[in-house]
Amino acid sequence: MPSKVKLPKPDKQPKIHVRTGDQVMVISGSNKGKVGTVIKVFVENQRALVEGAAAVYDTKHVKANPQAGVEGGRIQRLRPLHVSKLALVDPTTSKATRVKHERSDAGLVRVAKKSGHRFPVTSK
């Protein structure tokens, strides 16, 4: 019995409301309410690596291999979080916010729903 069923990939990449460098707040799970910074976004899996207080770590047990110069022990690795658990932090209110997208001359701009703060457009 297979442990995971691979679903077919979508034709186009799904849209994600977080980008690298964003301040985000975890809105569900054991780290609820903690704030961190997005390091990397995996668009196809809809997950993001977050560092700071909101970081979640996995422990991997590594066997020593003297020939390869690998020391044995336990290694802490960042675990990617699903983007549905993350909300952008509004700099004006320092609270989690939802965003809407507006068109401007610079392209699509993310705008906070309540305060109207415009998040700057970052180049990829």
Image (cartoon, helix red, strand yellow):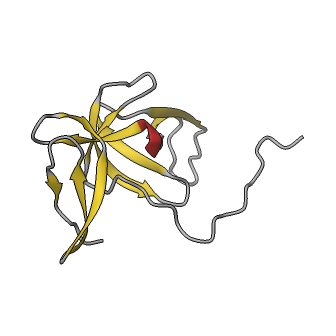
- Residue 57 visible to the viewer: yes
Q: Nearer the viewer, residue 51 or 45?
A: 45
The residue drawn where x is 20% and y is 40% is 114
- Residue 82 visible to the viewer: no
State the image coordinates of residue 53 (x, y, percent, origin top left).
28, 30
Q: How many marks?
A: 0
Q: Looking at the rendering, which quadrant does residue 41 occupy?
A: bottom left
Image quadrant where one finds the N terminus: top right
Q: Is residue 55 above or below residue 14?
A: above
The residue drawn where x is 33% and y is 51% is 39
State the image coordinates of residue 63 (x, y, percent, origin top left).
61, 38
Q: Is residue 12 above or below residue 51?
A: below
The residue drawn where x is 34% and y is 52% is 18
Q: Looking at the rendering, which quadrant does residue 37 occupy?
A: top left
Q: Is residue 93 left or right of residue 15?
A: left
Q: Is residue 54 left or right of residue 12?
A: left
**Residue most toward the top?**
30
Q: Is residue 10 left or right of residue 48?
A: right
Q: Is residue 15 above or below residue 71?
A: below
Q: Is residue 72 above or below residue 20?
A: above
Q: Nearer the viewer, residue 91 or 20?
A: 91
Image quadrant where one finds the C terminus: bottom left
